[in-house]
Image (cartoon, coloured by chain):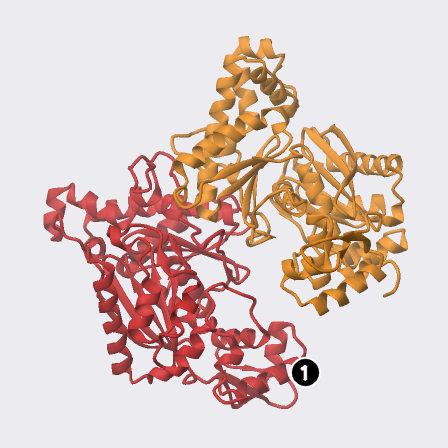
Chain colours: A red, B orange
Amino acid sequence: MSWMDHQKFQLRDPTSRRLAGMLRNDDGPVTTGGRMLDLLRTRGTLSRVELAELSGLTQATITHVVRRLIDGGLVREVGRAQQGRGQPRRLLELDADAWYAVGVQVDRTTTTVVVIDFAGRRVATAGFRGTGTSGPDAAIAALADHVDDLLHSAGVPRERVIGVGLVTHGPQDRQRGVLLIAHPTPDWLQYPLASTLSNRLGLPVLLENDATAAATGEQWSGMVPADTFGLIYLGSGLGGGVVADGNAYRGRASNAVEIGHVGLMGASAPCVCGNGGCAEAEAGPRTVVAQVLALPDLAERLGIKAHEEDTLADFERVARAWQAGDGDATALLQQSARWIGRAAVTMVNLFDLDTVVLAGPALVTAGPLYQQFVEAELTQHALGRALSLPRVLLSANVDTAAAIGGALHVLRSVPVDHMARTPA
Amino acid sequence: MSWMDHQKFQLRDPTSRRLAGMLRNDDGPVTTGGRMLDLLRTRGTLSRVELAELSGLTQATITHVVRRLIDGGLVREVGRAQQGRGQPRRLLELDADAWYAVGVQVDRTTTTVVVIDFAGRRVATAGFRGTGTSGPDAAIAALADHVDDLLHSAGVPRERVIGVGLVTHGPQDRQRGVLLIAHPTPDWLQYPLASTLSNRLGLPVLLENDATAAATGEQWSGMVPADTFGLIYLGSGLGGGVVADGNAYRGRASNAVEIGHVGLMGASAPCVCGNGGCAEAEAGPRTVVAQVLALPDLAERLGIKAHEEDTLADFERVARAWQAGDGDATALLQQSARWIGRAAVTMVNLFDLDTVVLAGPALVTAGPLYQQFVEAELTQHALGRALSLPRVLLSANVDTAAAIGGALHVLRSVPVDHMARTPA
C-alpha cells in the first residue's frame, strides 16, 4: 500500500483528501497544461503567441489549453502589450491566489518554513532551530505547529493549500516518505515522516531531497539561465542536485548526486559513509567548525564552543570572521571552498555541466567566497573548460532555496485538471 | 545549417535521401510505435496483451498501432502461445529483414564494424586496426571501404540500410558530427567526420560517444536487468555512460560521464586533461602498458615493445599473461582494476546506481578480473551499498558493444512512420 492509499482517508479536509490522491512523487510526464503553468511561473507574463513559440505547440492548441486554464481559475488575462508589429497581444499570468503550497526544510541545525503562492512567489517565511537530537515524534509535532502558525499569520486559507513539501537530507524512500538513514538519531530510520506530518496537518505531504529541491526550485523560479545545471547545497552537510534538460536527475531511487561522498585527491578525512577522503568529511561546514575547535585561540576569538550542536550558527561565525578580515578563518574557509571546487570538477565532468549554482544555509555570508573558489577550480580543472567556460552562480535565496523548491515540487505534482477551481 | 541539411541532397540513393532528413540525433520523444518496436526488440516475441501490460497502454491503442506496424512491414505475427487461461494469443516479432543498420566503432588502435538487422541481431562483424596516427581523410576512406565490403559480403542490400552509427571517443558535437578534441592527431579537431563518411557511403551517418553507445546498446539488446545503470568502457582510454529510466544521460552537450577524468584519492599521474590523478591516467589500458614498459623484464617476457602504437594489442598481452598466471602482470591489472573500481564508486554515488556494466575491447580477456575487483570496490565503498547491493556485469559483447550500440541508435532514430515499407 502506498503512502497515498494510507493517508487519503485520514485527511480531514475534503479538498486535501481529493488532492492527496492526485499528488505524485514520481516526476511523471508533464501535460500541456502543466507546461503552460511552468512557463508562466518562470517568465511572469506571456502572450499566447509567446507560449506557442516557447512550447513549440500550435496556436490552436495553446488557445484551447489557455481557455481551460482560465476557466479553471488558474490563469488570467492582464492587459495587452505591443510585441512587434500588428495588434497588441493579450498578456497572461498565473492567478497567484489560486493555490498555495508550503515548503519545510529541516535538518539537525535548522528548520525553514515557506509559503508560496501559485505564481511561485514567497508570501511568508519563518526560520527555527533544527531537530537537534530530538526524535522524529517531537520534531514532526514541532514542524506541524510551525506550519500551522505560519499559514495563520500569513492569512492563507487552509483549503487553498495544495500540500506540503518536506525537504531533508538523503538517502530517502520518497514514495514511502521515509528516511533510509539513522540520522540525526537512530529512530529517524524508516520513521513515517511524510504520513505523520500529513496526518497532523490534514494536508498531503511529499518528501524530497534538500539539494534536489533547491536545484528544481532555482529552475522553476526562473533563476538559472540554463536547462542543464548542477547545484551544490551546503547545509550542515554537503549535497548536490542536477537538473538535466529541465528535469531533476533522479537515478535509481532518487538518491543521486551525493557530491559529499566524492573522494578527493590528496584527501583522507574519515567519513560517516565508512570511506576516507570524502568531500563532506574533508570540507563540509561541520568539518570547518571542527577545524576551528582544533585551534583554541581561533575558537575562543570566534566564540565557538565544543559540544554544542549548532553547526550552522558556528559556521556562520567563521564566515563573519572572514568578512571582518580574520586571516585564520579565511584560510579555513578557502581550503574548504577549494576542496568543494574539486568535488565540483568531478560532478561537472560526470554530468557534463557548465553551470553550477551554490545554495544552502551555510552560504548566507560565506557565499561569495565559495563562489569565487569553486569557479576558479572549475575554470582550471573541468574537462570541458575549453568548450564552454564554467560559471558558478550564487542562489538569490541561499537559505530558503530548498524549502521553496519543496513547495514548488508540490505545486507541480498535482495534475492540472485536478487543480481547476471551477469545472471547465 | 545542420549537418542534415548539408548532406541530404548529396546522398545518391533516394531511400537514403529520404531517411537522412528523418534521422534525429537528439533522443527526441519516443512515439507509441517506437515503444512497441523497442519492446519487441528487447523481448523477442510478445503478444498484444503483453505489449499492453508492459507499455501501460490500452488494448485498443495497441491493436491500432500494431496493425500499422504490420501493414508497414515492420512487425509480423508468428503463431500462437498459450498464456494463462483463455484463447492462445498471437505472438508478434519484428520483421528482421525490414531494415538493417551499420555500427562503426573507431579509435586509435581498433576499428569494429557490425551490421545488425531490424531485430537488433548482429548479422556481420569485422575488426581492423585503428586509425593510428593517420589523418581523418585517410581514416574515413578506409572506414567507408570496410563498410562497403562488409555489407557486400553479408549480402545486405544497400537500399535496406537505414544508416550508419559512427562511434568514437569524446568530446563530440553530435549535431554537427565533429570531434571537439585534437585526438588522435590535430587535424581530427572539427573535421566533418559524419558528413564525409555519409558522402562517401551514400548513407546517413550519426555520430555517437563510444561509452554511451555501449550503454544504450546493452539496454536495447535487453542485456541488462535494470532501467538505470552505468557502463564503464575500456578501450585504449577509459569512458563511461549512464542509462537513467531507460534513456541515455546526455548532460549539456552529450559529453557526460567522463569517468576517465574522475580524480582518485591517493593518485597523482599527470593526465592529458591537464590535471593529475585522473582515473584514466592512473589506471587506463595505456597506463598499464606504460607500467609494463617500465619493467624491462616483464616487457620482454610479454613481447611488448616501446614506441609501438597498439595499446589494445599490448594490453591483451598483459591480460593473457594474467590468465597464464604471471604474477607481475596480475599485480598491474589488479591495481588498475582497483583504481577503476574507485572511480566507479564516485560514478555510482553521483548517479545513484546499483548496476554497472563493463564493456570495451580491452576486456576481451581481462573482463572477469575487472568485474571481480570493481564489484569488490563498490561492495565495500559505494554509499548505497546497504540499501541495494551493487552488482557488476560483464557485457556479452565486450569488444563490439559500442558498434552495436551505434547501429541500434540509428535504427531507433528514424520515426516509425518513415520506416514503413508499404503505405499504411
Count the labels in the image. Answer: 1
Compared to A148, does B76 lie above or below? above
Please, which chain is the residue tagged with disc 1 on? A
Residue B206 in sight in this render: yes
Q: Residue beneath label 1, please?
A: A60
Place of residue B12 in the rendered image (x, y in percent of width and height, measured from the top left) = 89, 51
Q: Name the amino acid, label 1.
A: Ala
In the rendered image, which quarter is residue B303 located in? top right
What residue is rendered at 41% in x and 41% in y?
B385
What residue is rendered at 87% in x and 42% in y?
B156
Position of the N terminus of chain B, as image quadrant, is bottom right
Front-most of residues A35 and A17: A17
Q: Residue furthest front?
A: B85
Compared to B384, does B113 lie above or below? above
Residue A397 in sight in this render: no
Compared to A58, does A244 lie above or below? above
Place of residue A49 in the rendered image (x, y in percent of width and height, measured from the top left) = 62, 81
Position of the C terminus of chain B, as image quadrant, is bottom right
Q: Residues within 10 Å of mark 1 (few under 14, many from 20)?
A: few
What residue is rendered at 44% in x and 70% in y?
A221
Place of residue A156 in the rendered image (x, y in percent of width and height, measured from the top left) = 32, 83
Q: Is residue B135 left or right of residue A277?
A: right
Front-most of residues A222 and A386: A222
Q: Is residue B216 left or right of residue B370?
A: right
Place of residue A202 in the rendered image (x, y in percent of width and height, measured from the top left) = 33, 76
Q: Is residue A166 left or right of residue B11?
A: left
Compared to B116, does A170 lie above or below? below
Question: Element type at marker 1?
Answer: helix
